[in-house]
Image (cartoon, grey):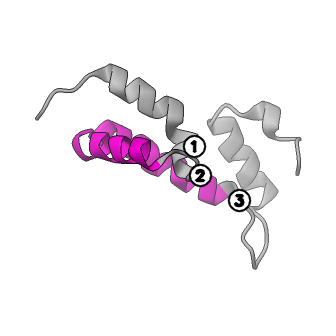
């Protein structure tokens, strides 16, 4: 197991949303992807965040996430303040 700086992890987590949304410059994306290759913890956070985003987005076709499922998810993620916004 290779060691790495947790400062790199903090920087990645600070840019995670922009990375997922494709809003970062390509050189920064390359740097993040290099970090992800050697850091399983950050890969888990990235994958979990992507899955969570997929769960809360309304599919283009089909029904939205059932309100009780959405409520449990938001409470679990400690996002109660967003429960009543936009939906």
- In this view, 40 is above or below 51: above
Q: Position of residue 3 (x, y in %)?
A: 16, 27
Q: How many marks?
A: 3
- Mark 3 vs mark 2, foreground winner is 2
Circle 1/circle 2 CB separation < 8 Å: yes
Label drawn at residue 21: 2
> Image check: 19 left or right of 74?
left
Span shown in magenta: 26-55
Residue with the mark numbered 1: 18
Give neighbour class at mark 2: few <14, some 14-19, many 20+ (Cα, 10 Å): few
Element type where label 3 sits in the image? loop
Q: Name the residue tied to disc 3.
A: 57
- Residue nearer the viewer, 31 or 45: 31
Other residues around mark 3 within 10 Å, as few (<14) / some (14–19) / many (≥20): few
Q: Position of residue 20 (x, y in %)?
A: 53, 50
Q: Position of residue 55 (x, y in %)?
A: 63, 58
């Amino acid at each position: 197991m290779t060691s790495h700086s947790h400062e790199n992890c903090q920087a990645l987590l600070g840019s995670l949303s922009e990375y997922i949304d494709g809003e970062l410059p390509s050189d920064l994306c390359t740097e993040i992807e290099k970090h992800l290759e050697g850091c399983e913890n950050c890969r888990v956070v990235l994958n979990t965040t992507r899955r969570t985003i997929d769960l809360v987005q309304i599919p283009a076709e089909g029904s939205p996430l059932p309100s009780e499922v959405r409520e449990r998810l938001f409470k679990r993620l400690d996002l109660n303040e967003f429960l009543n916004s936009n939906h």
